[in-house]
Image (cartoon, rainbow, N blue to C red):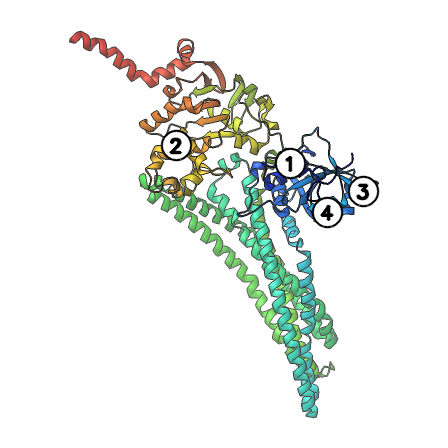
């Protein structure tokens, strides 16, 4: 295929397919994202460009922004700057996204070195459309040299790897360049530290003995020069250490929060929130160890490498004594290491239990105040505080013993060696003079600190290992990452099928669903009724992808649930629960939360459909009214209607209402029920409700009993043929029957 003649402006339309007429209505951002989507489909990953969130004021996605987004979607991505000749390396491999200067993009799908052209495909082209041949001259007029390479992630990515000390050290060693610079600075600083002791030795041995002022002046100049360089290098090293600490801290926190969000919902349902939060706080202990004690001790190691040979040169006997004392210190710490580590583990667990009580009390403060449970909560809190304090006291007391035994040895290393050296000099067992002896004292002090630091590092390491274990109990649970990033993304019509589905909760004694089979046509309004524990909410959990360990098949529009991309599934559903959480923010932000690109008009439309518009307009600032934490400044009915509006804002084809009206007052419930027919128009609705009167207008009502589907039919049919449904209906409407029975008697009395 030959390129067509140049178009006006020097770049032919066929050469740069992103300039085709049909793309005039698309923005550069949309074109770049479509190019990325085209390349991702090569690996069988169907991305949703609506999930991309650009930075504020961003004209079009930068290479770095695209890389970050793709890595979060289960792909490995890298941005490079290449020359023309490098494009020919991809002629038989994977597609490469070219980022053009005008903010658009194209996809290189092949190359022909013999003709000196690459084959470029427009992001708006269909699969059947052939690519266009582009030569170097024409491409370089529009191409900046930036490319985006992507491929499917293989094995465990960084976000899925177990949280261990090895993983943490891998994060640290990613800063190889900075670590190398710090190492060079440490070696030079260690060498510069040798100068002052030797200057003092020269002063005592030469200046004082021969009264040589010229030598003294020269030594002063040398000393000042070296002090200046040591000061500058020390400042630079501290600056680099701060940068490494900030980067490691950032990566740790980003990873932990991302991994926490990837955990399945059932983990949070069976874990105490306070204990989980307390475990996550252990990251501060890890960060302080990695970027503080560990890095400092690592840097002190360079001091040992440089200074140890020198002190052995000055006085081998005293140097050997210093090393022996350091060995004794290490032995003492090793003896106490295991018992201290065990007590630290108990102390950390006690702190987690204390934090769990605090969090539970704060979250349930309304219940505590309403039921006057303050004395009981104080009692529980006192027990947890006493337990934590006792364990902390036990750790402190046991840790005090090795410190007490080590202190005199440290004092001997810094001060006793000089007395020993003086004795050896006087006794004539050594040739060391007074200048060398003083130099040894200064240098041995610099050796003692890292030697003792290495020994104490072992104790700190065991504490940090305990902290890592506490965090790992949370983060190393199986995440939903693969389900969120992989899978198909179908466009839903709303047909729901359960085919012989059986599901049992992990600690359940009997199946929550037992061989349930049902087919719900698209656009139907279906009610779910039954006694508590009959399996109603379990059906909605399976539809949301919260629980996937079932047998049989759950399908939406013929696609098995476990094959659907989990994030796509949940964004395509409208979910309203019995107790809905609203974020601290404006009414508009809560309605449009998690949906980038939606406007106030979309929020108004959803609020009107949910029956929330009338009370929003009465608020002081309308849709910009601030909702406080816990939704304390709005009523329960208002909160529920805002949740319904939030579920409707994306116009989902499938909606699930799980006891959505149970918290509403009669007026609000009547308003929502009156809107249900209008809300359900054109979409499939699954409504779980204990109030059967709200399900009378449903097309079908499923009656559940002990995890089995007993019957499914409209309301009138169920009243006639289903005993369970008729019993539930009579229980809830006996007052109506009583009133109807009393009416004839009253009439006769008149």
Pointer 1: what residue? Answer: 37
Pointer 3: what residue? Answer: 116
Percent x, y of residue 290: 60, 56
Q: CA distance from mark 3 to mark 1?
A: 27 Å
Task: Say if mark 3 contacts mark 1, CB within 8 Å.
Answer: no
Q: Residue furthest left?
A: 750
Percent x, y of residue 683: 49, 23
Task: Say if mark 2 contacts mark 4, CB within 8 Å.
Answer: no
Foreground mark, 2 or 4? Answer: 4
Percent x, y of residue 377: 37, 44
Give the residue drawn at x 57%, y 42%: 259
Q: Residue furthest bottom?
A: 211
Query: Picture quarter containing residue 49?
Result: top right
Foreground mark, 4 or 1? Answer: 4
Q: Is residue 479 above or below residue 437?
A: above
**Tag 3, which secondary structure?**
loop
Pointer 4: what residue? Answer: 140
**Tag 1, which secondary structure?**
helix
Foreground mark, 3 or 1? Answer: 3
Pointer 2: what residue? Answer: 641
Q: Earlier in the sequence, mark 4 or mark 1?
A: 1
Q: CA distance from mark 3 to mark 4?
A: 13 Å
Whether residue 434 is visible: no
Q: Earlier in the sequence, mark 2 or mark 4?
A: 4
- Along the line of sight, which residue is nearer the eye, 94 or 719? 94
**Mark 1 Cα-neighbour bin, 10 Å: few <14, some 14–19, many ≥20:** some
Q: Which of the numbered marks, if any, corresponds to residue 564?
A: none
């Amino acid at each position: 295929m030959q390129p067509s003649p140049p178009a006006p402006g020097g770049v032919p339309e066929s050469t740069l397919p992103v300039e085709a007429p049909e793309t005039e209505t698309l923005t550069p951002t949309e074109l770049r994202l479509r190019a990325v989507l085209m390349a991702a489909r090569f690996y069988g990953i169907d991305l949703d460009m609506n999930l991309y969130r650009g930075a504020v004021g961003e004209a079009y996605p930068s290479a770095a922004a695209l890389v970050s987004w793709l890595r979060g979607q289960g792909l490995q991505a890298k941005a490079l700057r290449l020359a023309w000749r490098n494009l020919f390396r991809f002629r038989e491999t994977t597609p490469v996204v070219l980022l053009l200067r005008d903010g658009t993009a194209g996809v290189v799908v092949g190359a022909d070195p013999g003709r000196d052209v690459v084959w470029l495909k427009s992001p708006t082209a269909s699969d059947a459309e052939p690519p266009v041949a582009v030569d170097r001259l024409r491409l370089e007029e529009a191409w900046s040299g930036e490319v985006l390479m992507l491929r499917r992630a293989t094995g465990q990515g960084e976000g899925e790897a177990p949280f261990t000390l090895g993983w943490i050290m891998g994060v640290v060693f990613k800063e190889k360049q900075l670590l190398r610079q710090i190492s060079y600075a440490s070696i030079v600083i260690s060498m510069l530290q040798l100068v002052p002791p030797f200057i003092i030795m020269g002063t005592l041995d030469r200046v004082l003995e021969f009264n040589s002022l010229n030598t003294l002046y020269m030594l002063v100049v040398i000393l000042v020069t070296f002090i200046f360089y040591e000061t500058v290098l020390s400042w630079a090293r501290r600056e680099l250490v701060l940068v490494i600490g900030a980067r490691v801290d950032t990566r740790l926190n980003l990873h932990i929060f991302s991994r926490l969000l990837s955990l399945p919902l059932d983990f949070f349902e069976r874990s105490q929130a306070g204990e989980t939060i307390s475990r996550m706080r252990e990251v501060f202990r890890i960060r302080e160890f990695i970027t503080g004690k560990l890095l400092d001790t690592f840097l002190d190691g360079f001091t040992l490498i440089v200074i140890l040979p020198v002190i052995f040169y000055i006085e081998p006997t005293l140097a050997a004594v210093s090393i022996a004392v350091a060995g004794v210190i290490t032995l003492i710490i090793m003896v106490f290491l295991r018992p201290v580590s065990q007590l630290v583990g108990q102390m950390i667990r006690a702190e987690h239990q204390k934090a769990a009580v605090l969090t539970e009390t704060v979250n349930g403060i309304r219940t505590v105040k309403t039921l006057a449970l303050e004395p009981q909560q104080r009692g529980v809190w006192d027990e947890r505080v006493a337990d934590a304090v006792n364990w902390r006291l036990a750790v402190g007391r046991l840790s005090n013993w090795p410190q007490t035994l080590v202190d005199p040895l440290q004092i001997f290393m810094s001060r006793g060696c000089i007395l020993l050296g003086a004795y050896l000099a006087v006794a004539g067992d050594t040739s060391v003079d007074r200048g060398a002896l003083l130099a040894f004292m200064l240098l041995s002090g610099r050796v003692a600190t890292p030697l003792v630091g290495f020994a104490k590092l072992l104790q700190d390491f065991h504490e940090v290992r305990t902290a890592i274990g506490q965090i790992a109990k949370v983060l190393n649970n199986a995440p939903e990452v693969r389900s969120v990033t992989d899978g198909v993304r179908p466009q839903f019509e709303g047909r729901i099928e359960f085919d012989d589905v059986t599901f049992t909760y992990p600690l359940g004694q009997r199946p929550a669903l037992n061989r349930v089979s049902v087919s719900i046509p698209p656009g139907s309004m279906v009610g779910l009724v039954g006694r508590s524990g009959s399996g109603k909410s379990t059906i909605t959990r399976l539809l949301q992808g919260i629980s996937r360990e079932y047998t049989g098949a759950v399908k939406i529009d013929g696609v098995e649930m476990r094959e659907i991309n989990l994030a796509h599934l949940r964004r395509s559903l409208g979910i309203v629960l019995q107790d809905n959480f609203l974020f601290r923010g404006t009414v508009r932000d809560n309605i449009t939360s998690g949906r980038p690109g939606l406007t106030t008009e979309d929020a108004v439309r959803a609020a009107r459909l949910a029956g929330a518009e009338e009370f929003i307009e009465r608020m002081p600032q309308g849709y910009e009214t601030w909702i406080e934490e816990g939704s304390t400044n709005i009523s329960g009915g208002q909160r529920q209607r805002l949740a319904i509006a939030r579920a409707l804002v994306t116009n989902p084809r499938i909606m699930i209402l799980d006891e959505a009206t149970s918290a509403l007052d009669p007026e609000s419930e009547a308003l929502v029920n009156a809107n249900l027919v209008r809300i359900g128009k054109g979409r499939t609705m699954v409504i779980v409700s204990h109030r059967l009167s709200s399900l009378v207008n449903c097309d079908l009502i499923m009656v559940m009993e002990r995890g089995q589907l007993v019957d499914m039919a409209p309301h009138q049919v169920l009243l006639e043929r289903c005993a369970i449904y008729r019993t539930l209906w009579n229980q809830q409407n006996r007052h109506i029957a009583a009133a109807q029975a009393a009416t004839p008697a009253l009439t006769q009395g008149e």
